[in-house]
Image (cartoon, helix red, strand yellow):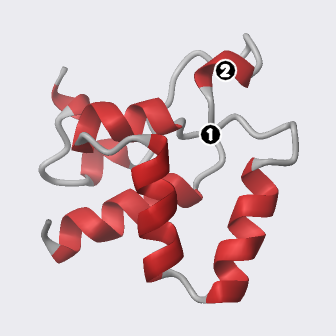
Amino acid sequence: MTTIELDRIIEMAWEDRTPFEAIEIQFGLSESDVIKLMRKELKSSSFKLWRKRINNGISSKHLNKRSNEITRFKSNQQRLISNNKISKR
């Protein structure tokens, strides 16, 4: 995995509106793989804050838990990112 891909995965995981399923589609990493990666790459305090935020019950990190009003997972900046498979669909 390149540094650019690693940075993008962390960015997508950190965003509240990007579900784990989008990361899996784009990079082939399951939710548990993303959690392991975040644990390894983030400071301990940052990882704890992230886990607390995505497990708080109102997170939209899981497609089956998110509001029906949210119909997409692409960020507004996504088309500006190179090598993004989803933006080319």
Residue displayed at 73% across by 10% down:
68
Say which residue label 1 marks: 17
Residue at the image point whose x is 57% and y is 60% from the top: 14
Q: Quadrant for residue 62, please give it.
A: top right
Question: Circle 1 sits in a helix, a strand or a loop, which is it?
Answer: loop
Of callouts 1 and 2, which one flags the residue occurring earlier in the amino acid sequence?
1
Q: CA distance from mark 1 to mark 2?
A: 8 Å
Q: Indicate the position of residue 17 as horizontal and vertical percent values.
A: 62, 40
Q: Secondary structure at mark 2?
A: loop
The tag on residue 55 is none
Considering only vertical position in the picture, is 74 above or below 10?
Answer: above
Along the line of sight, which residue is nearer the eye, 65 or 89?
65
Pick the residue in front: 26 or 76: 26
* Residues at marks 1 and 2 touching, judged by CB atoms closer than 8 Å: yes
In-image side of 50 versus 34 (left or right): right
Q: Residue at x 58, y 53 (%)?
A: 15
Image quadrant in which you'd find residue 58: top right
Where residue 19 sits, quadrant-wise, is top right
Q: Which residue is mark 2?
A: 70
Depth order, front residue of 69/58: 58
Q: Residues within 10 Å of mark 1 (few under 14, many from 20)?
A: some
Question: At label 1, which amino acid type do we have?
Answer: Arg
Which residue sits at x=32%, y=45%?
29
In the depicted structure, whether residue 26 falls above or below residue 8: above
